[in-house]
Amino acid sequence: MSDPLAQAILRYTQRQPTPSPYQTAIDGVYILRSDNPTPPTYRLASPAICVVAQGAKWATFGADRLEYRAGQALVVGVEAPSLGRVFEARPDAPCLVLIVELDLAMLRSVVEQMAHSPKAASESVRGVLVTDFGGPLADCALRLVRLLDTSDAIPTVAPLVIREMGYWLLAGPHGGDVARFALADSPSQRVMNAIRALRERYAAPVHVDELAGVAQLSRSAFHRQFKALTSLTPVQYQKQLRLLEARRLMMSQSMAVEAAAFAVGYESASQFSREYARMFGAPPKRDAKQMKTMLEAG
């Protein structure tokens, strides 16, 4: 292993008394280590930059699948359901990932201070992308990990390094797209306001015209930009949100299948079970039991 970032992350993980994932002493910074390939896992992704120092992962958003490996990063600018998996990892060469949450308000502040605002390649901005991770970006990531050894400096230095990381991200080849989903007056940010409204009321029937009104867009423009950002239609997005929340309720609160279905907005338990099995690969009761067994074993 010759990459300094991979070496620094590996040293950090070797000192930890518990298994991955690790919430570090820097707010919003996490480290993942996988010694073997992992099964696909559903989650609700949040704005973040996920840097692979060693190994490889893939993530799907809707029908779009993105692979990213050592020297690359997944940049997520929108909250969206996703499916991800580590597919390249060995005990002697674990997959090592640094995750830094992205504060869109911070990115917006950086854009406003840039002499030349980054330009987006097209009107329809993707909310998720893969970028090469080298040069100043890699230097920032390495400094963040090394900063974990000097806890007294973290409150002062870490925010500056994360802000610098935001600058180099905005100054890079995908800076225009990143700026578009960060700027408050952009169509992408208005669609993200509608996404937040949908998330807050995910158990209620979805009304696309109402969401388009929140985004201040026509129905057709809203539908197009929503799918560009999330790789899902509003109805697909809501369905996946409901199923993810129902799974969480059954796992964390041991809620019965029918109770979980009704709690997230389903009127038919049989429809819920069909859609749940289609998404997670097993009926709700069996899936919850399998997940609990895996967690207890791990």
Image (cartoon, rainbow, N blue to C red):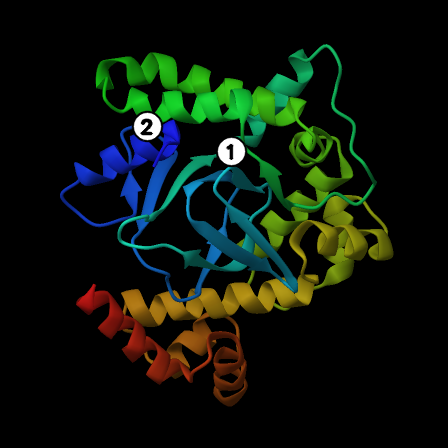
SS class of the residue under badge 2? loop
Q: Position of residue 31 (x, y in %)?
A: 34, 40
Q: Is residue 234 visible?
A: yes
Q: Quadrant of residue 223?
A: bottom right
The numbered mark at residue 102 is 1
Q: Residues within 10 Å of mark 2 (few under 14, many from 20)?
A: some
Q: Indicate left or right for 91 with 135 as reference.
A: left
Quickly name the residue at label 2: 26
Of the numbered discs 1 and 2, the one sitting upstream in the chain is: 2
Q: Indicate left or right for 266 with 22 as reference.
A: right
Q: Position of residue 95 (x, y in %)?
A: 37, 48
The numbered mark at residue 156 is none
Q: Is residue 203 above or below residue 128?
A: below
Q: Residues within 10 Å of mark 1 (few under 14, many from 20)?
A: many
Camera-side residue: 74 or 80? 74
Q: Quick check: marks 1 and 2 in contact, CB under 8 Å?
A: no
- The kind of residue on which mark 2 rests is Ile
SS class of the residue under badge 1? loop
Q: Is residue 59 above or below residue 144?
A: below
Which residue is located at x 65 percent, y 43 percent?
193
Label 1 – label 2 distance at C-alpha: 13 Å
Which residue is located at x 70 percent, y 63 percent?
233
Instruction: Classify the position of the N terminus by image quarter.
Output: top left
Camera-side residue: 112 or 48? 48
Callout count: 2
Camera-side residue: 271 or 265? 271
- The kind of residue on which mark 1 rests is Leu
Q: Is residue 212 above or below residue 40?
A: above
